[in-house]
Amino acid sequence: MKISVCLMAVAIGFTSTAIASRNMKDATGVYRRSKEPQQVTILDSGIASLKKRLDMIENAKQSIEMEYFIYSIDTAGRLVTDALIRKARQGVKIRVIVDTSLPIFELNKYYASVLKEAGIQVHYYNPAVLVRVVTAQFRSHRKTLIVDGVEGITGGRNIADEYFDLSPEYNFLDTDIVVKGSIVQDMRKSFEEFWNADLTEDAPLVRRPRPSDFPGLSDNFENDPWATQDKDARISISRYKGEIARYEDGTAKAKAFTVLTSEDRRIRSYVDTFGAQLLAKEATGVCNDMIFAADFPGMGEKTRVLRKQLAVEANLAEKKIYIESPYFVVKKEISTILDDLLRRDVEINVISNSLYSTDAFYTQAIFDTRIRRWTELGVNVWMHKGTIDPKIYPVIPDARPSRWGTHSKRAVIDERTVIVGTFNMDPRSTNINAEMALICRDNPKLAMAVQKNIKEHIASAAKLNRAGLREDGRPMHENVPVSKKVLFWMTLPLANVLDFLL
């Protein structure tokens, strides 16, 4: 690999603790390698992952830090929020960072205000307006929950029903890694970097609008018979009433979000019973050589810590590598890594989504048009078909009719090294979004457990041939609704031009 030597030097050159700075020019992110024993659990089941998160929150004694790309207003969101509020009332310090990417942002200022009133601090990452096109592209794609500085979790799952096998329509197959040990302190330092970053803002505390907030109105205008005679005053009155309606609607919805419904309690019973059973079966072990690598908030090459570390890990591969990623859009940086692996005769196995199973048809447009380059070179590629086998992947009855797609961001190298985090094989994770991952080296037991699960996904996927088409001869877009196909073809020209943003 042309860049492997310098990348190795960069990785070794990182200090063993977080480098804290609010100056973006000096930012170098967080890198930590520890050879102290770290207790590890791999979470493949969605409902088991939700159970683990709720258990971690309920066991907290001093502090909880949470950071998510998506925090949805749904059953999963209410269950987590309910658990957080109960701990806040017990005096546990709770801080939450939520990314504000407009297409998926739901935890707005009304919800944040209700959480603040309950004793939970909320920060928004990069609430950039659309007119700031460049700045708005840099998102925090990180996902983490840290309790008391001793136990942490990261991986692909956000806070939403579809990440925990709860949706009757569409769910993600995903992977989290839980670690308990000294390296959690470095995860916490990385959280602090984002909590204090220039791009992070305190979520606003919403108050009820007053008439005096609007030009020409006094707080007792309703008792003034002449108030409606002035044109400008009438405009202000209309604006005031509109803002009052928005405030009351937003506040009512936010307060309702903190109260569990009967449906929420029904799902919680599944989490506490079925989820607990599946959690007990998840792979566990002790990692004696663990790396935590996390990007720094902001923009620029210096923030790219994880990508460089992934290149280092790939450079260490000797025989084979299994990769699972929801998107497989390969640009220069990742292409260099794959080309080197192929040159060294390392077997590369990749499973990603099909158009049917994906949640992002625009990304699939790039996959379909460019995957042939890699299959011709000998990369083994599979596309998820969008279904699961309940005998292999047990789910609650509500989720059985669901369509499924992979959302895991993980890899296994030489059946010894496991990588689990938030990094997708796409340009956004490579150059734009802030990401994080935990890497466990030299642990065949955990590596084989993760590889076994990847192979289970492969068994229900469609293999591509050297021409980049399905080996079984079936259509690439099998079972895809016409409406989704139309969006796919309409997006294709634009996706090819803007692939660096996908």
Image (tube, rainbow, N blue to C red):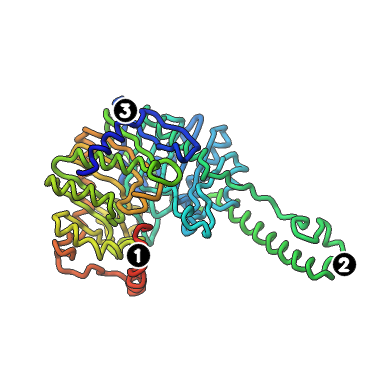
- Which residue carries the number 1 mark? 497
Up the image or down, 15 lies above or below 3; here it is above
Please tell me which of labels 3 and 1 falls first in the chain: 3
Mark carried by residue 226: 2
* SS for dot 2: loop
Q: Nearer the viewer, mark 3 or mark 1?
A: 1
Q: Secondary structure at mark 3?
A: strand
Residue 198 pos. (x, y %): 52, 42
Q: Earlier in the sequence, mark 2 or mark 3?
A: 3
Is residue 277 visible in the rendered image? The answer is: no
Rounded to the nearest angstrom, the CA distance separating label 2 from label 3 is: 74 Å
Q: Is mark 1 in CB contact (under 8 Å) with mark 2?
A: no
- Disc 1 vs disc 2: which is toward the camera? 1
Screen quadrant of the C terminus: bottom left
Residue drawn at the location 22% of the way across and 42% of the way down: 314
Spot the residue most to the left. 345
Residue 376 x, y percent position in the rendering:
14, 59
Return the residue nearer the eye: 283 or 490.
Answer: 490
Residue at 34% x, 43% y: name it: 421
Q: Amino acid at mark 3?
A: Ser
Q: Identify residue for label 3.
A: 34
Q: Residue furthest top?
A: 36
Q: Residue furthest right?
A: 225
Residue nearest the observer in this picture, 151 or 375: 375
* Type of amino acid under label 2: Trp
- Where residue 11 is drawn, which disc sits there? none
Residue 92 percent across, percent down from the top left: 54, 33
